[in-house]
Image (cartoon, rainbow, N blue to C red):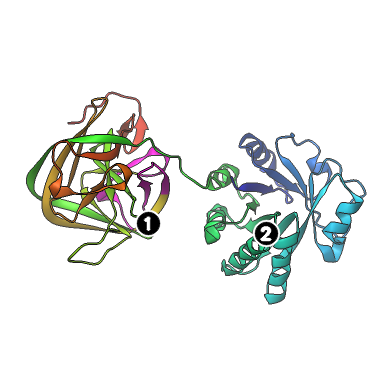
Amino acid sequence: MKLCWLDLRKKNDLTPAVLEEAVHQRLDGVVASSVADLADLPPTVKKVLFPDGPELPEDFGQADIVIVTPEKHGEPAVLAARHPGVEFGRYVEIVDAATLEVACQAAATERWSLLWFRDPTKIPLEIVIAAGKAAKGTGSLITVAQDVEEAEIIFGVLELGSDGVMLAPAKVGDATALKASAVSRTPDLDMVELTITATSHIGMGERACVDTVTHFRQDEGILVGSHSKGMILCVSETHPLPYMPTRPFRVNAGAIHSYTLSKNSRTHYLSELTAGSKVLAVDVKGQTRVVAVGRVKIESRPLLSVDAVAADGTTVNLILQDDWHVRVLGPGGVVHNSTELKPGDVVLGYLPTADRHVGYPIDEFCLEK
C-alpha cells in the first residue's frame, strides 16, 4: 500500500472536516507546520512536522517525523543523532540538474525524502526512483501532488511509483480520493472451469475488438459474456496467427451486447466502451489489473454462440466472431480456437454473484436468458 500524507499546513474553514475525513479514512500521515497542530491527532496517523520558518522548535512534541530543509535547519543525520526519538527527512525542491542530483542522493541515503518538482514532467521522478532502487535505499520517497489526478500518476511512475504522496486538499472528499488512488492493485478473481455444452452459427451481427493501451501476456485477456452472472476468458491476440501479425494490445471480444468486467466489480457493455474507458485484464490464475481502452472497433461479422456450464450448474453464454483466429483460454493457458470448440471442451470463466443495474452489482431479482 502506498503512503498518503495530507498537508494541512495552510488551515482554513474546511480543515476540521478534512482532518476528520483523513482520520476516518486512515490516511498514513498528517502534515502540520507547528507542534501544536499535531497535539490532538490520534495514534492511528503519523504526525509529520514540516516547519515553514527557518527555526526548529526546541521541543518536537508528539511529532513522529520532522521534515527539514538542510540549508535552514541542518542535516537530517545530525538532527537524528541529537533527537533519537524522532525520525528526520529531507525536503528537496527539484528545479534543475543540481537539485535532481541532491534528490537522488536523498533517495539513496535518507529515511524520508519529501520531493517537490517544479516542472510537470515525470522524468525527474523516474530518475530519482531508479537512483534509490539502484543504491538499494531503504527510505521512503514522498512526492508532492497538486491534485488527486496527479497523485494517481505519481503512484504509477516506472510501474513502482513513489512510495507516497503529500497532497494539500482543496475540498472535502480529497482525502478519500487520495486513499483510493493509493490502492495499487485490483483483487484476484476466483476463476472456474466451464464445460462447453453447445455451439451454433447464428448469422451476421456486430462484434467489438477492444484495443487497449497495454500489452497483454499470452495467458491474459478480458472476461466477456452475454449474461452478467457468467463470463468466459477471451484471450488477446498475443498468439501467432498464420495470416496476420500478432496484436498483443487487442482482444477480439464478442458481440456488442456482451458484458465485460471493469474495476470495483462493475460491468460495461462492449458497445459503450470508448477511448479512455477502463476494463479489467485477467489471467488464467485470476490475477487482475485495470487497463485503459485506446479504441473499440465495431464491425459486422458472422457470429458464433457458445454455451457452457459450471460445476454448480450455472450456465454461461458467449457470442463472438465466427472465425478460427478468435480464441478463448482454458485451464493452464490452453488456447482454444472458437470455431473448433465442441461439447466437453473446458474453458475458463468467472461467475459474478450479483445482478446488475447500469453496470453496478445489486441484490435484486433478475432473470437473464
Highlighted range, magenta: 262-289
Q: Is residue 246 magenta?
A: no
In three-dimensional space, the C-alpha distance between marks 1 and 2, rounded to whole angstroms, equals: 36 Å
Residue appearing at x 22%, y 51% in the figure? 327
Q: Position of residue 195 (x, y in %)?
A: 21, 34
Position of the C terminus, as image quadrant, is top left
Q: Residue furthest bottom?
A: 97
Count every numbered label the image shows and give the total. Answer: 2
Q: Dot 2, crowdedness within 10 Å: few (<14), some or many (≥20)?
A: few
Give the labeled residue for mark 2: 136
Q: In the image, is 261 to the left or to the right of 103?
A: left
Q: Is residue 283 magenta?
A: yes
Q: Position of residue 65 (x, y in %)?
A: 78, 48
Q: Is residue 92 visible?
A: yes
Q: Dot 1, crowdedness within 10 Å: few (<14), some or many (≥20)?
A: few
Q: In the image, is 8 to the left or to the right of 215?
A: right
Residue appearing at x 36%, y 46% in the figure? 282
Give the labeled residue for mark 1: 276
Closer-to-camera residue (159/191): 191
Residue appearing at x 29%, y 63% in the figure? 247
Q: Position of residue 245 (x, y in %)?
A: 24, 67
Q: Position of residue 191 (x, y in %)?
A: 34, 37
Q: Amino acid at mark 2?
A: Lys
Closer-to-camera residue (109/366): 109
